[in-house]
Image: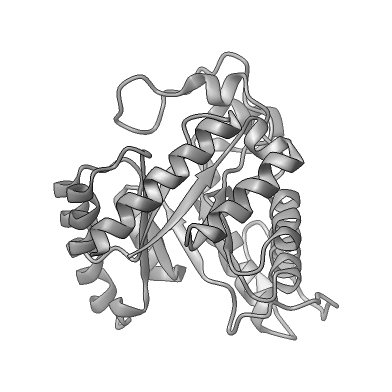
Amino acid sequence: MRYGVHVNSGSSVTDPAVLRDMAQLAEDLGFSTILIGDHVVPARQIQTPFPLKIDNPPWAVYQEHDWPDCFVTLAYLAAATQRLRLGTSVILLPYRHPAVTAKMFATIDRLSAGRLICGVGIGWMQDEFGFLGLPFAERAAMSDEYARVIKALWTDEHPRISGRYVTLDRDVNFGPYPVQQPHPPIWVGGNSLPALRRVVSWGDGWQPVALPLAELEQKIHKLRDMVEAAGRDFNQLEITTLSMPDVSVAAARAYAALGLHELSMLTTTDQAPQLFAEMRRFADTLREAAG
């Protein structure tokens, strides 16, 4: 089981020296992936209920910390690293026109020589949708259509799209195209049954968050059944999740036993010394768990 690091906000992703040093330390420690979150304008006082069943939701992360643009950040990381896979976890598909998203993703895949992972989700923060002028109730339908538009632009030199939100009835000069073929992997974020359906329909991987091990195991079995019923090969999917830095060796082994491909560390501080220490402990734990 591979291991990665997930960062969202604060000085760990806004201070260029800290971000560079964190990414290079990740490579030195054997991390496989660095993942960057996505929000544009969270409210100072969020009214939307938190989507995960956890105690003490991290409201301050959304309401007080800086959230740099994930695409620009990944481009910076592409130049600062050699081996790390670079991913979003997750971009919110309705927030940008799919041609813009497809272009930015394809460009990063080019600049990184094929190291991009496209983690995507439908979004949950109704306050933010309102500020952006987007219909919150249509976010699932928008995401499904946008994902198909993105894949069409990546893989078809003559795409034709006639959808509810996007129409393309003529040839366009889209390039550059991604390095990875047929396209960079798309990881679908979310814990719900509709999220699993999206994996089956157009995803290449699944990234749930904050699921207890027993529930995670049940949903992996459910996903396997759904994928096989659709005639797809379950073994071609990547399944990943996120963990706190203090994960135990036993828990890491339990995740691996479920067949997870990657476990990524959620950062709990944006202070460089503490962050780097967390990364070292996490890497030590995952290496010990692997035996």
What residue is shown at x 58% (from left), y 84% (from top)?
182
What residue is shown at x 68% (from left), y 59% (from top)?
98
What residue is shown at x 69% (from left), y 55% (from top)?
74
Quadrant where the image shows the N terminus: bottom left
Quadrant where the image shows the C terminus: bottom left
Residue 166 in percent (x, y) is at 69, 61
Going by the picture, which residue comes out furthest to the top? 45
Front residue of 119/252: it is 252
Front residue of 237/269: it is 269
Relative placement, left or right, of 24 versus 228 is right
Q: Quadrant of residue 155?
A: bottom right
Residue 138 in percent (x, y) is at 53, 44
Task: Inspect this view and state whether residue 164 appears.
Answer: yes
Q: Quadrant of residue 9?
A: top right
Residue 45 in percent (x, y) is at 57, 13
Colour convention: one colour
Task: Inspect this view and state whether residue 119 appears.
Answer: no
Q: Quadrant of residue 259?
A: bottom left
Q: How many marks?
A: 0
Q: Is residue 227 above or below residue 210?
A: below
Front residue of 52/279: it is 279
Q: Is residue 183 above or below residue 58?
A: below
Residue 200 in percent (x, y) is at 36, 69
What residue is shown at x 44% (from left), y 39% (from top)?
278
Relative placement, left or right, of 30 versus 222 is right
Relative placement, left or right, of 258 versus 65 is left
